[in-house]
Amino acid sequence: MQVEREQIVADFDEYEVLDTNAKPVQTFDQCVTLCKDPYEAAAGAHAIAILTEWDEFRTLDYERMYKAMSKPAFVFDGRNVVDHAKLQKIGFEVYAIGKPLEQHRDMNA
């Protein structure tokens, strides 16, 4: 995990992400699950969201992740850092944030 728990908690506090008026009150640990690696995080999930340009996203074993995910499985690439055609061949539905919608239709056809 590249970002430490303390930093994530601080960011949640700074941006007031949790509803402090909720009954019962929401706590960070009730709302967020931190995982040691991306394979653990993807297991059982329907989607992967890539929100940074970290090099590790280019070298992950996406076939392994796809096999462990619920289907349909999606990749939302907010930084356009992965090979979309390769992910589609694996079986992912890929959405490249910032690309025209027509490209999404062509990619997922």
Image (tube, rainbow, N blue to C red):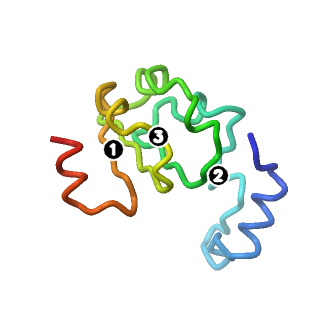
Evaluate if marks 3 and 1 touch, with contact meaning CB atoms under 8 Å apart. Answer: no
Callout 2 amino acid: Val
Is residue 66 toward the left or the right of residue 85 in the image?
right
Q: Which mark is residue 82?
A: 3
Callout 3 amino acid: Val
Quadrant in which residue 18 is drawn? bottom right
Dot 3 falls on a residue whose secondary structure is: loop
Q: Which residue is under mark 1?
A: 94
Camera-near label (3 vs 2) is 3
Percent from the top left, x then y, of residue 90?
33, 25
Q: Which residue is mark 2?
A: 32
Q: Label 3 to label 2, Cα distance in Å?
A: 26 Å
Is 15 placed left or right of 98 in the picture?
right
Label 2: few (<14), some (14–19) or many (≥20) C-alpha neighbours in 10 Å: few
- Which residue is painted at 72% across and 33% down in the image? 36
**Viewer-proximal residue, 4 or 83?**
83
Disc nearer the start of the sequence (3/2):
2
Image quarter where the C terminus lies is top left
Q: Residue furthest left?
A: 109
Percent position of residue 79, x then y: 50, 54
Circle 1 SS class = strand
Q: CA distance from mark 3 to mark 1?
A: 10 Å
Residue visible at 19% across and 58% down in the picture: 102
Q: Earlier in the sequence, mark 2 or mark 1?
A: 2
